[in-house]
Image: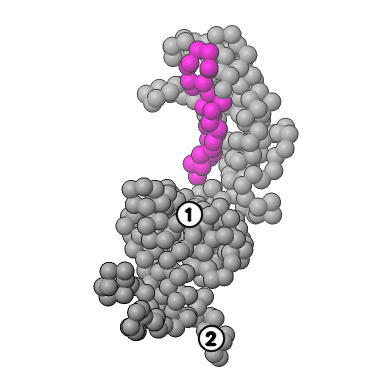
Amino acid sequence: MDVNGNNREAKDFPGKIHETPGGGIVLSKLDDVINWARSNSLWPLTFATSCCGIEMMSVASAKYDFSRFGFEVARATPRQADVIIIAGTIVNKMAPVLRRLYDQMADPKYVIAMGACAISGGPFFYNTYSVVKGADHVIPVDVYIPGCPPRPEALLHALITLQGKIKAGLTREQIKEDSFLNP
Amino acid sequence: MTNEDLKNKFTELLPAISFEEGGEWLNLFVSPEEFKFFAGKLRETPGLDFDYLFCLTNVDWKTHFTMVYHFTSTIHRHNIVVKVKLDRSNPEIETVSDIWRTAEMLEREVYDLFGVKFLHHPDLRRLIMPDDWEGWPLRKDYEDPVNMIRL
């Protein structure tokens, strides 16, 4: 019930409002509330290794603006970031750096592989001595976006998909935690 | 200087030189033995004053290598491309890093990826690849059975 006396339920909020005279009680699972809160404030790491990075910057800027969905501020340190968007080719020399960045991120952490290079080594550089054939050889990936580079809308879609995954408790982190707590 | 003036000047310096025109820039073919002498003249000779080496690379033609040097003069604004054929089995050429300092890094890169030995280079080490890397990845016959499939 809001100030005008209208029934109001947040569309995305997990749980129900149990009406009582003079107010209401929210019924929900704590895990769901935490997931809901986390999914709406995901800070990406400033990390880009090639042209997909330019596309990512354009999604961050005013025209597409991923902060509308809670990807508020890009953090320049992995210790303050929740999600790493792998935007670009990962070469063998970069792989240990990527691994270290991922390890330095605080739990819970999520990974988006953006573009053909991050998924599989890329359409151009696949058959070379220097390229890692997919970033998931180095760190676990939650969401893949195909494209070379993907459209900004595709990145937004991936970000929203990640939010949905977190809300449903289906990211790798959450499944790992679950299986650890309830073997 | 126009291309004609440049050609006359080069022939004067080096009778054995040959030219190729039609592209964006005048191309010069020089033998590896005469290259160092010629490079020194390019920089020193008044009127030529090629004071800027803006690109240094190598091409693997399978039968031989071709070193490609792009020069420009910031004073006269004329450009040339100098090409030097090298023996593919033992690619060696004198360094020009004492004439154009920028060549120090550029030559290290070419050494790293093609294995061209630059004689009298002050610090000829690998630049991009790891120090313990074996082989020269930009050669046409380079094979890496772990990371590459043969096409």
Residue depicted at 63% across the width and 14% down the height: B44
Q: Chain of mark 2?
A: A
Percent from the top left, x then y, of residue B18?
49, 21
The amino acid type, in three-letter code, at marker 2 is Ser
Q: Chain of mark 1?
A: A
Looking at the image, residue B13 sits to the left or right of residue A170; the answer is: right
Give above or below for A40 relative to A54. below
Helix, strand or loop at disc 1?
A: loop
Residue A157 in view, yes or no: yes
Percent from the top left, x then y, of residue A22?
34, 79
Does the stretch in magenta take in A91? no
Camera-side residue of A22 and A46: A22
Comparing marks 2 and 1, which lies closer to the viewer?
1
Percent from the top left, x then y, of residue A132?
52, 61
Is there CB contact under 8 Å for labels 2 and 1?
A: no
Range of residues picked out in magenta: B53-80
Q: Quadrant of residue A94?
A: bottom right
Residue depicted at 47% across the width and 80% down the height: A31
Q: Quadrant of the C terminus of chain A?
A: bottom right
The total of numbered circles placed on residues is: 2
Q: Main secondary structure of the magenta part?
A: strand
Does the stretch in magenta take in B61? yes
Percent from the top left, x then y, of residue A36?
42, 73
What residue does disc 1 label?
A: A73
The amino acid type, in three-letter code, at marker 1 is Val
Camera-side residue of A98 and A160: A160
Give above or below for B30 relative to B62. above
What residue does disc 2 label?
A: A179
Q: Residue furthest bottom?
A: A183
Residue depicted at 61% across the width and 25% down the height: B35
